[in-house]
Image: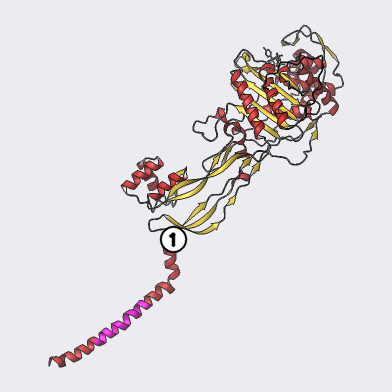
Amino acid sequence: MSEQVHKPASSFRIMLVMLAVTLVPAGLVARAFDLHVTNKDFLQGQGDARAMRTIPVVAHRGMILDRHGEPLAVSTPVDSIWAQPQEFDATPAQLAKLAQLLDLQQREIKKLITSKKQDDKEFVYLKRRINPSLAQQVIDLKIAGVSLLREYRRYYPTGEVTSHLVGFTDIDDKGQEGVELAYNEWLSGSNGSQLVMRDRLGRVIKHVDLLKNPRPGKDLVLSVDRRLQYLTYRELKRAVFKHKARSGSAVVLDVKTGEVLAMVNQPSFNPNNRSNLKGYRYRNRVVTDTFEPGSTIKPFTVAAALGSRKFTPGTYIDTAPGYMKVGSNTIRDIRNYGRINVTEVIHKSSNVGASKMALLINPQNLVHVHQRVGFGDLTGSGLPGEVTGALHSPRVWRDIERATLSYGYGLSVTTLQLARAYSVLANDGVLKPVSLELKNTVVQGEQVLPATFVKQVRKMLKGVVSAEGTGKKARVPGYDVAGKTGTVKKVGVNGYSDDKYVSLFVGMAPAENPRLVMAVTIHEPRGKDYYGGVVAAPVFSNVIAGALRLLDIPPDYMPDKNVKFAKWEGRP
Ligand code: 59J
């Protein structure tokens, strides 16, 4: 009986089992088909969206090099630690260690992550530009959502010596000052992007695809000569220190090309450590600071006077008794030079002589000469913060304005403008654009002053550095040089100060066929000496002596037995 009852029941169960055995796999197959074929893209997309991330590929910034290819700014690899706020998950122990390694407060990290998470951000830097071994220690903590990104850090091998010229970048490697800012586009390039895959804990485990190639920045070759830059820096710093001066600037130009060979300032700063950077240190004073040029303007007064044809280098002017009244003002020389000719006006630096010449020529023509040699105008250096200075041309001229303009007051100039203007004197009247970039070609200039008059002025400037001239400390053994000293009272709240001066020397070498022009500006020497001929001229001598040798420029000095050689301040 039991068997009979059992039979039909068991055959029903068998059928049931067989049905299950066939249907379940069919369902699974159908489901599998559904997952793997029908909905594949959707599901894979969902999964990938959780596992994939797009992160930047940081572009390499171009190098800045000197004219011989020596590096002035280079980008070295560093690592940055970043997190995905949605994935970030650290145990208390991991968080403590992370904070310690990154030198952050645990609170800071939590706050950062939470706020970015609320903003739905997928990327936040925890610490940038740390050294790769420290970065590896962070990664070894294996914290969910924490990864590493390769970036670059700017390094300036020549440090404070080139800092004003080269400038610096910010944390995102964008130019902030100097050439870094002026040529930012050229140097930058553009970042690319990459697709990366993360593991279950959100850490980047695999580079999947380069979505966009980074375009690396281009290198920039400057016209400066690193060796000359060092020399100029050292000599300027030495003089500023020796005379307890407030600041100083110097620039050396190549006469034939308009290239800047050296450009330095004091005080300076270390661009590799800018934690205490103050504006007064990083200003490139060569282009940002103006002053009244004083007597260094006199060669241009003389050029205008010669141009008027009312004067020749030998024309006599009576400067006695060493001062002259112009309206209610008195113009003074430091001594009574008596009757002297135009050449001697330059040699002695007579304010009275220059004024008397200026009062006999058209003031418009005097300003015209200044304009043509570039005063009142940007030099085209492109350096950030460059100013034009001030050069006025009143419609109605008062005599006192004509007179003071002739010996360098009532206008203001930069050190770079002064050097450029003297390069016109060096270049037989041709003005060449100032360039910070290396020029491989001959640079065409513009004839802005007649060559004949310029040659006459240059001859006068040779006399300034003779044993009797105001600039004898500018001399260079073995070479003829030419130039002009200047000592300028600074303007204070109560008019011209009696204890604050600018000491100047601007000159060129070799005098017959000049290759180099240099301007030296020293503000507020506070020692016993303050004359340009004592404070600034030795800087010119020491730098130009070295530069002529570095550039292999042959000596041209013809010994004149009647002139005793002045004591040379430089080292052998
Ligand atoms: C000077 C001036 C100020 C402005 C005079 C410098 C004037 C003037 C009003 C007396 C020091 C000083 C517009 S001097 O550069 O003549 O470089 O080796 O600052 O004259 O009228 O105790 N330079 N400098 N003048 N002002 N106003 C000479 C001269 C110059 C020298 C020395 C001695 C001044 C030889 C200046 C130098 O050529």
Report which quarter residue 311 is drawn in: top right
Q: Identify the residue under disc 1.
A: 49
Identity of the residue drawn at 40% across and 58% down: 199
Query: In the image shown, does 413 or 439 lie closer to the viewer?
Result: 439
- List x then y, in percent, for residue 200: 38, 58
Q: Residue 494's x, y, as percent?
A: 61, 14
**Residue closest to the far left:** 1
Q: Residues within 10 Å of mark 1 (few under 14, many from 20)?
A: few
Image x and y of residue 466, in percent? 77, 17
Colour scheme used in the picture? secondary structure
Q: Which part of the image, by quadrant, shows the C terminus?
A: top right
Whether residue 461 appears in magenta in the rendering, the answer is no
Is residue 20 shown in magenta? Answer: yes
User: Would you identify the image quadrant in which residue 350 lies?
Assistant: top right
Residue type, label 1? Ala
Q: Is residue 426 left or right of residue 543?
A: right
* Residue 508 can be seen, yes or no: yes
Q: Residue furthest top?
A: 321
> Range of the magenta residues?
14-29
- Tell me, yes or no, if residue 410 can be seen here: no
Whether residue 141 sits left or right of residue 247 in the image: it is left
Where does residue 520 sit, x and y in percent of width and height?
67, 24
Q: Nearer the viewer, residue 402 or 288?
A: 288
Q: Is residue 448 above or below residue 153?
A: above
| Secondary structure mostly taken by the magenta-highlighted segment of the chain | helix
